[in-house]
Amino acid sequence: MKIKRRRKGQLSILDLTGPLQGQELVVLERGFKHIPAEETIVLNLGDVTRIRPEALKSFIRELQRRNRAGGSLKFLKVPGPILDLLRKTQLDRRFEIYEYEDELGYIDVESEVRQKPKVNLAGLNAKAKDERCPNCGAILRTGAHSCFECGTTVRRRRATRHQVALPLLYNIVLSDEFLDGKWIGGITDDIDLVRFSGVGLYTTESFKPQQELRLVFPTICMGDAEAGNLTIFCGRVKNLVEVEGYTRVGLALFDTIEYRAQWVKE
């Protein structure tokens, strides 16, 4: 197995290549000890060919050790067979799993929000959105891993989504210029108000999977709005559902851009 360490912001990413079993696991555990426990490690498992169940026990021990010190252990690009193993052992509920590397930026954002809240959510009439079974539609119990009505195994969201209508503006990313292109108004169907990692909205526009959009929430204040800073969210289309002439778009938000703007009052 090959292990390559690199930095991304405050994160240590370990790119693993090859099988993870026996001696390879011992080498990885030694590598863990060379990284301060208060740091967050992201294991990139995209090129891991095989993994032994003993590795899962090692991951749990390392997660507990880092949590005690203020750090964490997360996964990136988990292959299908390994993901199935995590689901069978219900460890997907203990570890955060990311599909794309650009989504890792929200780990640092979440840490900053915990230390000093920057998002002004006063006045929002929001409630947690009910989770429903994809098979029978029954409402799932909080934290449930399977449906009580039909027994279907479900995967609980990693972050709570809230059913709240917020006005927004969005446009398709065509260039590096923030204000290029046509900005279209819309209203959210649901949104993650804690980490801002996902949002759902209805539209009459046509999009393709993985297409990138920029979004602005006029009623949400992040940072120093009085100084003229405008927060632009970057998102990627994850799913599309046709509903009575409209398209319900699910977006994964992966980055924010602070745009210096001069507000003009008429």
Image: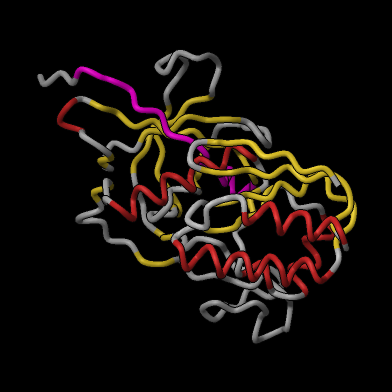
Does residue 256 show up magenta in the picture? yes
Q: In this view, does 70 lie above or below 183?
A: below
Depth check: give the residue in front, 260 or 21. 21
Q: In this view, does 78 lie above or below 266?
A: below
Q: Which residue is drawn at 17% across and 27% down?
A: 227
Residue range (magenta): 240-262
Q: Find the residue positioned furthest to the bottom.
A: 148
Depth check: give the residue in front, 98 or 54. 54
Q: Which residue is drawn at 37% across and 33% down?
A: 216
Left or right for 63, reference 153: left
Count of marks, rendered view = 0
Residue 246 visible somewhere in the drawing: no
Left or right for 258, reference 236: left
Rendering coords of residue 266 (x, y %): 10, 19
Rendering coords of residue 140 (x, y %): 57, 78
Query: What secondary structure do most residues of the magenta stretch adopt?
Result: strand
Query: Can you tell which quarter of the image residue 133 is in?
Result: bottom right
